[in-house]
Image (tube, rainbow, N blue to C red):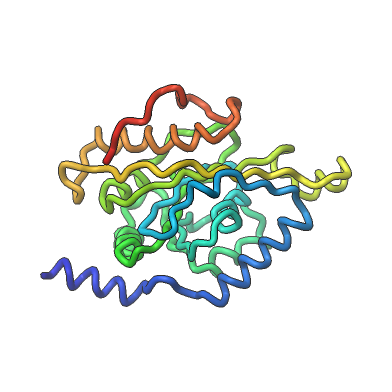
Amino acid sequence: MRESNSLTNWIKKYPYPRRRFIRGLLRSGIAMAAAVLTRYEVIGKENLPKKGPLLIVGNHFHFLDTIGPIHATKYLLEFIGDTDMPNAPDTMKFLPAAWSTLKIEQGTPNLDALRASEAILAQDGVLAIYPEGHVHPPPLARALPGAAYLALHVSAPIIPIATFSDNNYDLFGTIIKKKRRLRIWTKIGPAFGPFKSSNPDRPTREEIREASRTIMTNIARLMPPSFRGDFDVTQQTPETA
């Protein structure tokens, strides 16, 4: 009963969906910018379930790849994001605050973000998280444990979404120097999971390690070979449901 009451309190704090108007404006602005400044291609929309609960996982090569799930889907998305955004231009750092992303600090348990995530998914919401935890150049890096822990804890279906560009995301440099628009691709893979744990409240290290590998392998399958890093996409994804 105490656990149920606690979840109810978090649902009251984070009702799903939130901030429809401001997020609608941001989505429209992103769509307009993508049409004017880029050649943006979305592949795999047929893989998107009609509704949640759903956990979206993606790569994090650039702060702009966070637009992938927003631009490629119509979900009323919640995001878990880094509090610092060290690689984003100062002019862009208002966006997470405007969207009201769930903030985490790398290397901390951040129970508030976990409880908020539980509440969102309990309301059949859609939550996006970047398993690598921070922006880095290609190729894919090893995932931090947070995304796998969350996936094992909430046991929701998972959709991989990979976003990448040509010319190293040099948006304005491509226009000015190459006299063309930057190409961006967002590829959506089929759902997998949900993961099962012997103890969803305390998944084992081996369960987290295997779930992390499965998550990153499914993202890697959507990418050109040079972006896949050490992930062997020829391996079959183990049955998780």
Q: In the rendered view, would you say 82 is above or below 166?
A: below
Determine if residue 80 is in view: yes
Horizontal side of residue 173 vs 16, given as left or right: right
Counting from the top left corner in percent of width and height, residue 13 is at 34, 75
Q: Residue 111 in the image: x percent, y percent?
A: 30, 59
Q: Which quadrant would residue 216 be assigned to in this image? A: top left
Residue 148 vertical placement versus 108 (above, below)? above
- Indicate the quadrant containing the C terminus: top left, top right, bottom left or bottom right: top left
Viewed as shown, does residue 48 lie left or right of 238? right
User: Going 24% across and 73% down the picture, which residue do you hit?
Assistant: 8
Quadrant of the rendered image containing residue 28: bottom right
Residue 87 in view of the camera: no
For image coordinates 86% across by 40% down, the residue present is: 178
Q: Is residue 143 above or below residue 224?
A: below
Q: Quadrant of the N terminus?
A: bottom left
In this view of the protein, which residue sits in the foreground, 231 or 177?
231
* Vertical side of 9 occupied by 223: above or below: above
In depth, the one of 84 and 112 nearer the eye is: 112
Kindly indicate the quadrant of the structure image that contains residue 116.
Answer: bottom left
Residue at the outermost left position? 1
Count every numbered label the image shows and give the total.
0
Residue 215 x, y percent position in the rendering: 40, 38
